[in-house]
Amino acid sequence: MKIQILKEIIKKKSSKENFAVLTNLINGNSEIFEFGKFLSKDFESSKKEIENYHYLKKNGVIDGTQIFIQNYIKPIEVIIVGAVHISQYLFDLFKNLDFEVKIIDPRKYFITTERFPNIEIINGWPDEILNKLQTNSNNALITLTHDPKIDDPALRHALKNKFFYIGALGSKKTHIKRCERLKEAGFNEEEIESIHGPIGIKLGGKSAPEIALSIVAQLVSETHKL
Amino acid sequence: MKKQLKRTVLEQANVWIESNQKVVLARVIHTWGSSPCPTGSSMIINEKGDFFGSVSGGCVESNVIAECLELIKNNNLFKQIKFKVSEENAWDVGLACGGEIKIFIEQINS
């Protein structure tokens, strides 16, 4: 592989666009593939198969060829509402997994760079912030304040924009009330049931790092279901 | 939605290259049966034998490193290598889990 290809891959990874690296196993040549991109003669005869593998996000030697495709898929962007203690542990766990993380909190005294170094923190109301961000099914939402006036607008936004994972912290009782409010806001049963509430898989732990672990475990398991 | 783990292997390769070291990239291109690392897993090796990343969770790494050093020594650009468990090497190098993997190794060159 040429150094320039290696450098291009590193650069493209940070651009957050989906792409693939193709390698011709007969002559060792590699190049970067994106939908609509012109392919060199090492690969052009298999264009359709390459597009199909990339569409399916499938890595491997393409059937009937000597072309290896490795896909680089845009990471899931996790939006955490609530700059609380659990969020600090969540960030620690997420940083070794392939997720982008943002934390939103309207409470200035919670959302400080001292508490959250090296992470994108946004001070503001979740609905206002979320409307400015481009969000879609590549997003996940974790609400942690269990304050309806902070969490609910974020949950409504996530449901409307079809986030692939939505989880809300709070007891069973809190969650029942939350579901009632969302029903009143016009969401149907299926939508409301898609919210993971109380959030996380059952580990039994109650400490902040244990709750964070149970949330991350649930989110990772959901990404592998899709 | 397939998720990929953060790939820091290529960034490390770049660091080694910028300090004028020869680097070989090893990638899993095909797996059969139960092999521990999925297709696309990668590892890099420099001329000193330092390595970073993983292609099998520890089962065949030592052999891959030897192959990569050989590639540098003979100044070859790339090679495909295949590993599987067999009677004679089950206790030596091999995939204890009963899998087979094919690995593509290649020099990073200008």
Image (spheres, grey):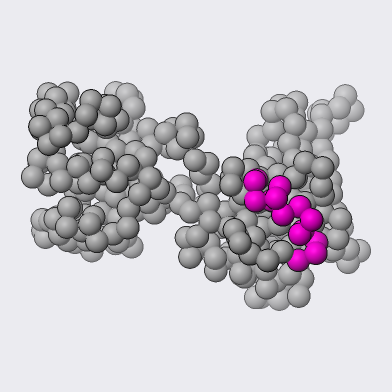
Closest to the observer, A5 or A55 = A55
Q: How many marks?
A: 0
Span shown in magenta: A40-53
Above or below residue A223? Residue A31 is below
Q: Where is the N terminus of chain A found, in terms of image quarters?
A: bottom right
Residue at left offset 53%, top offset 47%: B4
Q: Is residue A52 magenta?
A: yes
- The residue drawn where x is 82% and y is 33% is B84
Give residue A186's position: percent from left, percent from top. 15, 34
Name the main secondary structure of what is drawn in magenta: helix
x, y percent for residue A185: 12, 36
Is B37 placed left or right of A63 in the picture? left
- Residue A54 percent coordinates (x, y): 62, 49
Give percent across and percent down for residue B108: 74, 66
Asked if residue A198 shows in the view, the reply is no
Q: What residue is drawn where x is 29% and y is 50%?
A: A79
Q: Taking B68 as reference, is A51 left or right?
A: left
Queried whether the magenta region covers residue A153, the answer comes back as no
Against A205, residue A144 (above or below) is below
Is residue A107 shown to the viewer in this render? yes
User: Between A66 and B97, which is closer to the camera in this rendering?
Assistant: A66
Tell me if B3 is positioned left or right of A102 in this view.
right
Which is more toward the observer, A211 or A101? A101
Asked where in the image residue A59 lies, by quadrant, the reply is: top right
Residue B34 left/right relative to A162: right
Residue at x 59% of width, y 58% of height: A35
